[in-house]
Image: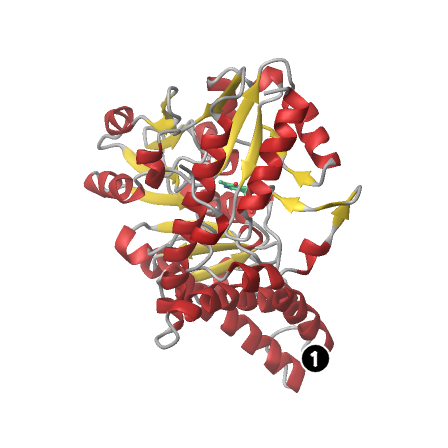
């Protein structure tokens, strides 16, 4: 039997969590808003909103000036770097901020690509979001060979034997997602990194979808780069890149001459989003505070790890309830892992289709009932093409997060039944 709210909300203080997010008070046509659209961007706690506006009120300036607000701005940036270092398990000088993951990845692919030659090879996957595909795929124009790893269509996992076959002594880089933003699959990135390093290649990990759901430890993964976006983990619209210190120093970014050559600043061009950086520290603190409820003493990193432990358990229970509730629907297909025994291998991100109902039509009708879901390909274009759903509107995607509730899952199931007659 799937679990009830009472049984799962004990470890995670769900009423405290819900109280942190002002947007949960929104209504649509009289229905409370249920945010099942988090894979496209999560809601933000009040403290993130406050940190952004406080920065603009009290610290608004450019960097490195000889006066108070500029000093505060430098501190804001340093604070955000330290917070992200705690979230990712690295040092502050290995954290680079940018506009979003896509632009950071384009910049890094240009910098890495300028040292590649015809005959060098890059391995990409057909499960990834296009932001971890197209920036690397574009290097084909300079003679680099691109190899694309297949997906096991039955459960939307990565075909690891195909991946092994695509790697050889010419491989210079493997770009792989930590988790799929479309179907939720979590990849064995530690093994991918090991395989990349076995042939001397770099491993570039897209953790955008994974970051709100599970702990990241770049040292344990030993990845060379890892990218994420704070707007997917309860923060502002920004991107963050981890790079091993040696790579950030060794590689050559395209940059303006006046910008310092010191790392990590050499990877940050122009003026950063300072208010967003204030928000990043606040969202990391929010995650840490979830953990501090379970583990009141210890470092911020330890609190973050404690938070993710509980987040993963809670989200798994919600995911089980949703997938269990969907199993008897007529004409409904869930894409990805559906066996509860294997739920450790997926995020609670559910892609589905119902015969006779276009995903856009479903999302629109759910939206009218205050249930925010998404339809389409979410830029996981290779996957929707592989699964042959691209021309029929892709999937309906339901994204569950630690701030969602059993009641919201049940409301969604009820509404789907009403709309699709399941
Ligand atoms: C898995 C994944 N990678 C990359 C991206 C792109 O992130 P950004 O919007 O920060 O460029 C997204 C956005 O949805 C994503 O889900």
Q: Which quarter of the figure is the C terminus placed in?
A: top right
Identified at 53% across, 25% down, the residue is: 352
Q: Which residue is mark 1?
A: 58
Q: Position of residue 361 (x, y in %)?
A: 70, 24
Q: Position of residue 325 (x, y in %)?
A: 50, 31
Q: Neighbour class for label 1 at 10 Å: few (<14), some, many (≥20)?
A: few
Residue positioned most to the left? 198
* Image vertical order of residue 271 relative to residue 78, above or below: above
SS label for mark 1? helix
193 on left or right of 260:
left
Q: Position of residue 53 (x, y in %)?
A: 70, 70
| Quadrant position of residue 255 | bottom right
Res 61 visible: no
Identified at 27% across, 29% down, the residue is: 160
288 on left or right of 405:
left
Q: Position of residue 60 (x, y in %)?
A: 70, 74
Identified at 55% across, 21% down, the residue is: 353
Residue nearest the observer in this picture, 139 or 16: 16
Residue positioned most to the bottom? 67
Residue positioned most to the right? 29
| Quadrant position of residue 191 | top left
Identified at 40% across, 56% down, the residue is: 310
Residue nearest the observer in this picture, 384 or 24: 24
């Amino acid at each position: 039997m799937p679990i009830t709210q009472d049984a799962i909300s004990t470890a995670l203080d769900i009423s405290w969590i819900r109280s942190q997010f002002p947007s949960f008070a929104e209504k649509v046509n009289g229905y409370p808003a249920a945010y099942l659209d988090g894979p496209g961007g999560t809601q933000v706690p009040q403290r993130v909103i406050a940190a952004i506006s406080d920065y603009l009120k009290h610290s608004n300036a450019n960097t490195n000036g000889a006066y108070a607000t500029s000093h505060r701005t430098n501190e804001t940036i340093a604070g955000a770097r330290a917070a992200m270092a705690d979230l990712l398990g690295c040092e502050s000088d290995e954290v680079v901020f940018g506009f979003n993951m896509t632009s950071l990845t384009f910049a890094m692919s240009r910098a890495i690509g300028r040292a590649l030659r015809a005959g060098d090879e890059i391995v990409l996957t057909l499960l990834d979001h296009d932001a971890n595909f197209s920036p690397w795929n574009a290097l084909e124009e300079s003679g680099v060979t691109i190899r694309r790893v297949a997906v096991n269509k039955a459960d939307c996992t990565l075909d690891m034997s195909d991946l092994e076959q695509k790697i050889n002594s010419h491989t210079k880089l493997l770009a792989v997602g930590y988790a799929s933003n479309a179907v939720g699959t979590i990849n064995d990135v530690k093994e991918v990194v090991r395989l990349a390093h076995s042939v001397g290649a770099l491993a570039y990990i897209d953790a955008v979808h994974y970051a709100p759901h599970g702990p990241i430890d770049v040292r344990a993964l030993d990845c060379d780069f890892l990218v994420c976006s704070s707007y997917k983990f309860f923060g502002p619209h920004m991107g963050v890149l981890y790079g091993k210190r040696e790579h950030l120093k060794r590689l050559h970014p395209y940059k303006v001459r006046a910008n310092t050559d010191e790392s990590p600043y050499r990877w940050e061009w122009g003026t950063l989003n300072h208010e967003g950086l204030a928000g990043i520290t606040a969202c990391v603190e929010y995650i840490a505070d979830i953990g501090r409820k379970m583990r009141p003493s210890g470092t911020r990193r330890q609190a973050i790890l404690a938070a993710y432990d509980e987040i993963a358990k809670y989200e798994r229970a919600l995911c089980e309830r949703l997938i269990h509730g969907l199993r008897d629907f007529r004409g409904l297909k869930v894409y990805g892992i559906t066996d509860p025994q294997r739920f450790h291998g997926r995020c609670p991100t559910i892609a589905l289709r119902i015969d006779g109902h276009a995903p856009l039509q479903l999302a629109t009708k759910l939206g009218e009932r205050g249930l925010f879901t998404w339809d389409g390909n979410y830029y996981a274009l290779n996957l929707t093409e592989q699964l042959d759903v691209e021309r029929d509107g892709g999937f309906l995607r339901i994204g569950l997060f630690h701030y969602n509730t059993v009641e919201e899952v049940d409301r969604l199931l009820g509404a789907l039944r009403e709309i699709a007659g399941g």
